[in-house]
Image (spheres, rainbow, N blue to C red):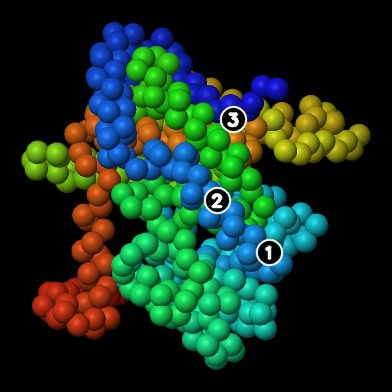
Amino acid sequence: MTQSKVSLYYKNVTSDIIGAEHGISKQQFASLADKLNKIIIKENVERNDGKTGYRDLPYNDLISSSVTKMAASVKGIENFVVLGIGGSALGNIALQTALNPYMYNIDSKQRKGPRLFVFDNVDPDQLASFLDWIADKLDKTMFNVISKSGRTAETASQFLTIWQMLNDRFPGKLADHVIATTDPKEGTLRNIANAEKLRTLEVPAGVGGRFSVLSAVGLLSAAVCGIDIDKLLAGARTMDQRVSYEDFYQNPAAINAAVNWHCYNAGKRISVMMPYSYSLKDMSDWYRQLWAESLGKAKDLNGSDLYVGPTPVKALGATDQHSQVQLYREGPNDKLYTFLQVKEFKKSVKVGSNPDYAPELDYLNGIQMADLFNSEKLGTEFALVQNHRPCMTVLFDKVDEFTVGQFIYLFEVTTSFAGKLFNLNTYDQPAVELGKEATFAVMGRPGYEDLAKKIKPIAEMDKNFII
């Protein structure tokens, strides 16, 4: 049986289609091939030397077996709640949206596991509403707190709130209701887990949060909710073979990175991802963190000023045809568009018959909704191409664990290749730290008093500027 596949289609970025001013010529592709062929080889060497730990996750049987065992241990619960933020949450959400039905949490007949809730923020109204709902369901609820250090303010505050609720209801039995995914040896959450004898899974060493979805960080909630994580990892392994090819024209991650880098340097500094699939909409959120946090950097590898970074934007077809495409077609030609398209949807919906007094709707009578959906995508792409806008398509044979694993791995390796093209450190995020430290200072954490003084003039609103 032929396995489902993810493919990259890039003809509509070429000068033959959108013109020499905005498209990429054959000569320019040849130059990009020279650059990327060297980068692919270097990346493969670094991978073999263990310098890109995320690339080995699909082959780590210990991770998948420990996750499967942990998922089995919570069988029978009715609610599974993830506490995390950024890379500790976005992948979980993306996998759930992609691989389980839209009505999963509401319709028990469509569920293969407990309801899933992922809290990736500290909005008090959102959390209070959930806490009111879950209060009488705690005995059938499992919480998975995900943090490498345990000191991230958002996740720590969520956890302390839940901890208080659980201790009030089940004194001394925190371990019955909490799984910690954290550093294997040290950190605040590891210390708590040891003291409370919590069940734990590990955040893998050398893998940043935004690259961690194929580890226990993203896999546990997926496995608990009935997603086939073995098939997901098998898809990633299949894509690993393709993105390791040392021939540029046979390597989809290399071409993807090259097109993005070329377009950025040609003034198209905004990268729009537009799925024509509700199932894939949260993959755009996952991609935005991966792209922005990896490639938005002030310094190059030599320490010189760089200040680069393509800005990732999400859109959803066909919804955003009616909210953004006016800008995309007639606004500044400063964007690269990547559509996500699905050949075969999980379900078929036939459009109903139109009434006799509305003959103008005859063309919709009895058609398949999937045909309309993909026609909408083609129509949008055609319209953009007419205005010389570069477009690529990531084409899914269907959305299942095998193709989603391919997609995740494709964009992770694309990000690594792009980082090398920009000559930056793809795996750090130095600019994130000051915002975290400023939060500590504002909240009065000891050791941040000097920073709190610097923040004070910003915190005190000048009434002359309030209208």
Q: Amino acid at mark 3?
A: Phe
Circle 2 is placed at which residue position?
Answer: 65
Q: Earlier in the sequence, mark 2 or mark 3?
A: 2
- Which one is nearer the viewer's eye here, 312 or 52? 52
Q: Earlier in the sequence, mark 3 or mark 1?
A: 1
Residue at image point 63% right, 73% down: 141
- Which one is nearer the viewer's eye here, 160 or 46? 46
Residue at image point 23% right, 81% down: 445
Residue at image point 31% right, 69% down: 187
Q: Is residue 408 visible?
A: no
Q: Earlier in the sequence, mark 1 or mark 2?
A: 2
Residue 221, image x and y in percent? 57, 58
Mark 1, Cα crowd under 10 Å, few <14 / some 14-19 / many 20+, is few
Circle 1 is placed at which residue position?
Answer: 75
Q: Is residue 81 left or right of residue 140?
A: left
Residue 120, image x and y in percent? 46, 64
Question: Residue 367 — which label?
Answer: none
For marks 3 and 1, give the one nearer the viewer.
1
Q: Amino acid at mark 2?
A: Ser
Give residue 21's quadrant in the image. top left
Q: Is residue 64 above or below residue 89?
A: above
